[in-house]
Image (spheres, rainbow, N blue to C red):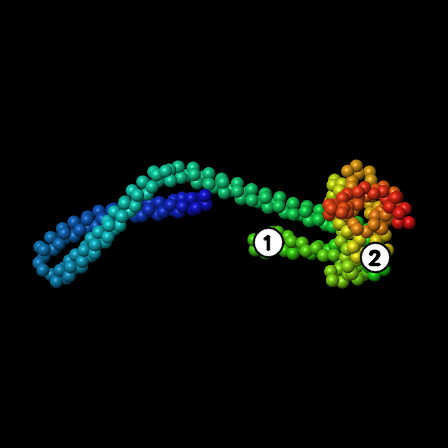
Amino acid sequence: MANLYTGIHLHYWSIRISARELEDNIQLKSTQEEILNIETRLDAVIEELKQYGEHQDLVSESQVLQQTSEELRKEIAHYEGRLKGFEEDEERCQRELGSDLYRNADEKHRHQVIDIKTTEMANSDLDKYYKALDRAIMHYHGLKMADINKIIKEYWINTYKGNDIDTIEIRSDEEEGSGATKTRRTYNYRVVMIKGDTELDMRGRCSAGQKVLASIIIRLALAETFCLNCGILTLDEPTTNLDEDNNESLANQLASIIKTRQQQRNFQLVVITNDEEFVLKLGRADFVDYYFRINKDDSGYSKITRQSVVAEESLLD
């Protein structure tokens, strides 16, 4: 579309230049007629001079005039050749203007200008909408990060029994794109542990138990923040590498979550674990009456058995 507009524009100016050259040629025709009149008068003067004999000055002047006349004839021939070329160009341009490509060129040009202007306006509007949406997303991201860290802090304080870490938080570092992705934002998320006013990255500085507990708490916080309409929460081996105190604290925290969300009709907490003590701890919270035990029979087939938490606790006692 832009190429068609440029082609029409260039051709328009080409025709203007040709028209100017045609006007110059018309002027040339007028000059030619004037030269013919001068030559006629010159011939008359020469004839008149012949009556006065072969005076040297007159002869010299006559030669100069003849030379000038010859130069003018050559110049006339030159411009006549150019005029013919311009006439041929004009005929060719007229034929092109009558072709399907250039027919109604003014109307086509007007439509193209309208399309370009409307496209520029649309691009400007889209840029405004993009910036507004980007600001809204950034604001939403900041609010959600604050909510997540608030929940993480609450869960960590209620669950973790050590005194070396006050709380943990998620930090997001924005990384600007470059080149084709310059308008895209990339976030690098990291978990930090906080003790007093000191903040350190948790990666590579925490024990296996702290890492597992942090992972569970972060997942619980994410689920509570973003999955309010999703009632299923699954934990697979949540007590791995946890010591006894943190194991019991996690059970109490899960019981607290169940109590908080028990009014949610579709809420389900699925815990997959080999830790029977952990199951019993959950059962003491009066929210779990039974659980399902999966084992293999003598034939090697998996078998699911429903077990009562109260009965299991009695057997262990």
Q: Residue at x 21, y 56 (%)?
A: 71
> Hey, what amino acid is under mark 1?
Lys
Q: Residue at x 86, y 44 (%)?
A: 309
In the rendered view, does 215 fall on the left or right side of 109? right
Name the quadrant of the N terminus. Answer: top left
> Where's residue 231, x and y in %?
76, 41
Observer-nearest of 34 and 102: 102
Q: Secondary structure at mark 2?
A: loop
| Residue marked by disc 1 | 182
In the rendered view, does 304 fall on the left or right side of 11? right
Q: Secondary structure at mark 1?
A: loop
Along the polypeptide, which appears first: circle 2 or circle 1?
Answer: 1
Q: In this rendering, which labeled residue sits more in front, label 2 or label 1?
A: 2
- The answer to whether residue 241 is visible is yes
Q: Residues within 10 Å of mark 2 (few under 14, many from 20)?
A: few
Observer-nearest of 228 and 300: 300
State the separation of the CA atoms marked 2 and 1. Answer: 47 Å
Observer-nearest of 303 and 132: 303
Residue 121 image-quadrant placement: top right
Res 243 label: 2
Residue 263 image-quadrant placement: top right
Count of picture labels:
2
